[in-house]
Image (tube, grey):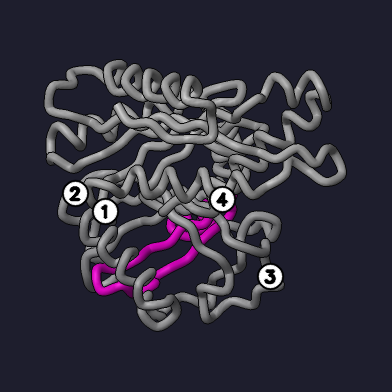
Amino acid sequence: MGIDNHDEHLALIAALPDLVFVLTESGRYAAVFGGQSNELYHQEHALVGRNLFDVLPHEKAQWFSDRILQTLTENKLMVFDYSLSGEDVDTLENQSGPEGLLRFEGRVTPFPTNRYGERAVIWVARNITERYQLEKQLIYHSEVDVLSKTFNRRKLFEQLEKSFYTFQRYQERYSFILVDIDDFKLINDKYGHHCGDKAIQHIASTCLSILRRSDILGRLGGDEFAIIHKVTDKDSAYVLAERLRNTISQLVIDPDCCNMKLSISVGISQFNSNDYTIDQIYKRADVALYVSKQKGKNCISLN
């Protein structure tokens, strides 16, 4: 006895490596196919007949529902990236698939008929967790300074450009703060580059512990850091710089390396309406930093 075309099609779909859902406009799981690999997917066939809002946290269910409506409204293939774990789905036994938060690419297209009693979409879910994690690592290494774990020079100036645009477009006020480790050459020459590295790491971690989430820290290179500070009042940049200077002046590099005390010199420039490039902002801060060095270090200057 032969297999009819419908059964053959179902067998082919069931053998697909990726999970295939038929989801209706109301959020009902009308059918689930494929995704037989336990290494990549949880076995989700128990979802059939259930509703998104019955098995997922409300916020996630609403996100999926919105994407279904968007696809039906656009009436074309849509592609969405999203994260989901087995713990998010009430009907699953977590032992049936991979652990932790997974990343998926959903390729969603309108179902061509009303076979399931209402409009529906075909949602093909592909596990892209490994690719996603690799991309995150590549982005991290392209943006972060390895030694200090702060933004590198390229990323810092990219952020400075964005802040400058925001300043010009929305009149939000910013300051640019240059921070230079005092006597860094002496630290390297007298105690070795290992202690110089320790000094850089100490300065970076101290700054990160004090800065607000809206502040951006990056290492320009060598012993120099920069902060993009979103101004809260006319003195906020100076107050922040003084807090950094005072905190760092009470630290030693590393008791196991050397007991030499750390200090910083600081130069501050404000974004102003006459600026037309970020170079002007940087140069004013650099001049202010030079003044701090000339005044004997461990101090703050504004320009």
Looking at the picture, how far across and down is residue 97, in whole percent? 67, 65
Vertical placement of residue 181 versus 203, above or below: above
Residue under numbered circle 4 = 247
Mark 1 or 4: the one toward you: 4
Whether the magenta-drawn stretch holds residue 16 is answered as yes
Mark 2 lies on residue: 75
Rounded to the nearest angstrom, the CA distance separating label 2 from label 4 is 59 Å
Residue kind at label 2, given as amino acid type: Asn
C-alpha separation, residue under disc 3 versus residue under disc 2: 34 Å
The residue drawn where x is 57% and y is 74% is 87
Please, what secondary structure does the residue beneath circle 3 have?
Answer: helix
Task: Write down the residue under mark 3.
Answer: 96
Q: Earlier in the sequence, mark 3 or mark 4?
A: 3
Sequence-first disc among 1 and 4: 1
Q: Secondary structure at mark 1?
A: strand
How many residues crowd mark 2 within 10 Å: few (<14), some (14–19), many (20+)?
Answer: few
Q: Quadrant of the C terminus?
A: top left
Q: Is residue 62 visible?
A: yes
Q: Give the mark, 3 or 2, whose residue is nearer the N terminus.
A: 2
Helix, strand or loop for disc 4: helix
Instruction: Tell how many labels.
Output: 4
Gap between marks 3 and 1 measured at Cα: 30 Å
Going 21% across and 55% down the picture, which residue do you hit? 70
Q: Which residues are magenta?
A: 6-34
Q: Amino acid at mark 3?
A: Ser
Q: Quadrant of residue 269?
A: top left
The residue shown at (34%, 66%) is: 23
